[in-house]
Amino acid sequence: MEFIISPLGDRAVLLEFGEPYLEETERKIRTVTAVFDEQQPAWFIEYIPSYTSVTILYDIHCFPRDVFPYEKVCLEIRKLFDSLEPIKITERRTVRIPVLYGGDHGPDLQSVAELNELTINEVITIHTSAVYTVQMLGFAPGFPFLAGMSQKIAAPRREDPRLRIPPRSVGIAGGQTGIYPIETPGGWQLIGQTPIELFLPDETPPSLLRAGDQLEFFAITKEQYDVYKEGNV
């Protein structure tokens, strides 16, 4: 399996696999994460997948003083993956996320529609018509970066980022869409809010979504939103 390996500080290596949004790139990333899920060398701390790469953090104290940790880690990673073929992704978990679009729950929906010369309903239809792939989690606990959004509803980040974004807000930035699991500052255009909790600190794993999942949005009414929030669904 081809990849580029390089140092990232003194306690991590970066494995790069190719262009974003390509299945071949994703297959290589899933191969690395699957291997480290099953077998973890003593020096391994954790991996962090992204759109095109995986960062591997390692413990330098696991190596003798006369060994250069970076070189040793590179050697072992080469042994693990050089002769390995990328796995085939045969099944994906699909998660459906209800969203209350517009109003106080999506204060930027109107501006996203105007920017793209669409009606609000057209934006909602386009946003709910796609099947998204969770490329990575980050920025905030459980925040999913999603591939697959139509460029018909793309919108730039806000010029005046908000200091507080309500948890579970659904946003658009550039050609991406995502969900803020927790309250945080942010500059994405907010088009709706889901009643579903994405960050689950008391569970293992502590995130509803995982890299590689497929995600579908569907629109709900305020009444349905309240029912979801009360846990009756």
Image (cartoon, grey):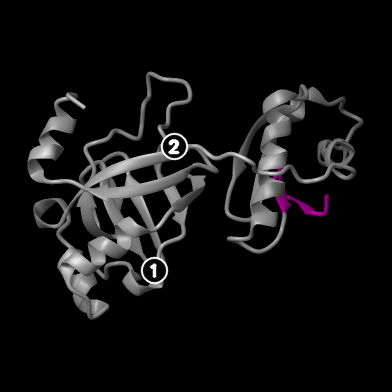
Alpha carbons under labels 2 and 1: distance apart: 22 Å
Residue type highlighted by circle 1:
Gly
On the picture, is 193 further left or further right than 209? left
Residue 122 forms part of the magenta stretch = no
The residue at 47%/21% (across/down) is 204
Report whether residue 180 is seen. Answer: yes
Q: Disc 2 vs disc 1: which is toward the camera?
A: 2
Q: Which residues are magenta?
A: 1-16
Which residue is disc 2 drawn over?
Answer: 209
> Who's the residue at 65% across and 43% down the image?
89
Dot 1, how many residues are within 10 Å of its Cα: few (below 14), some (14-19), or many (20+)?
some
**Callout 2: few (<14), some (14-19), or many (20+) C-alpha neighbours within 10 Å?**
many
Residue labelled with disc 1? 174
> In the image, what residue occupies the spot 37% across and 52% down?
178
Residue 8 visible (yes or no):
no
Magenta stretch contains residue 6: yes
